[in-house]
Amino acid sequence: KRLRFRRGPRWHGGGH
């Protein structure tokens, strides 16, 4: 998966 959801999915930062 890629870092395009920086404030949604937790596998992408979980609200970076």
Image (cartoon, grey):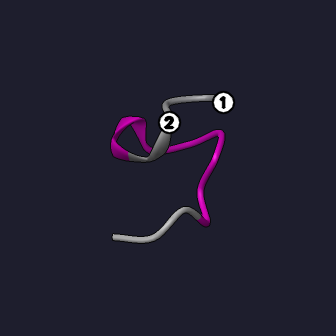
The residue under the point 33% across, 43% down is 11
Task: Give the left or right position of residue 1, taking residue 2 as reference.
Answer: left
Quadrant of the rendering where the C terminus is positioned: top right
- Mark 1 Cα-neighbour bin, 10 Å: few <14, some 14–19, many ≥20: few
Q: Is residue 7 magenta?
A: yes
Quadrant of the rendering where the N terminus is positioned: bottom left
The residue under the point 59% across, 56% down is 5
Task: Give the left or right position of residue 6, taking residue 2 as reference.
Answer: right
Q: Nearer the viewer, residue 12 or 9?
A: 12
* SS under mark 2: loop
The residue under the point 44% across, 44% down is 9
Where does the magenta region start and end?
4-11
Q: How many marks?
A: 2
Residue 1: image tag: none
In contact (CB < 8 Å): disc 1 and disc 2:
yes
* 14 w.r.t. 8: above or below: above
- Mark 2 Cα-neighbour bin, 10 Å: few <14, some 14–19, many ≥20: few
Q: What kind of secondary structure does the magenta stretch mostly adopt? A: loop
* 3 w.r.t. 1: above or below: above
The answer to which image quadrant residue 7 occupies is top right
* Amino acid type, callout 1: His
Q: Give the Cα separation between the discs numbered 1 and 2.
A: 5 Å
Q: In the image as oriented, which residue stretches furthest toward the top?
A: 15
* SS under mark 1: loop
Place of residue 8 in the rendered image (x, y in percent of width and height, measured from the top left): 56, 42
Q: Is residue 8 magenta?
A: yes
Residue 16: image tag: 1
Mark 2 — residue?
13
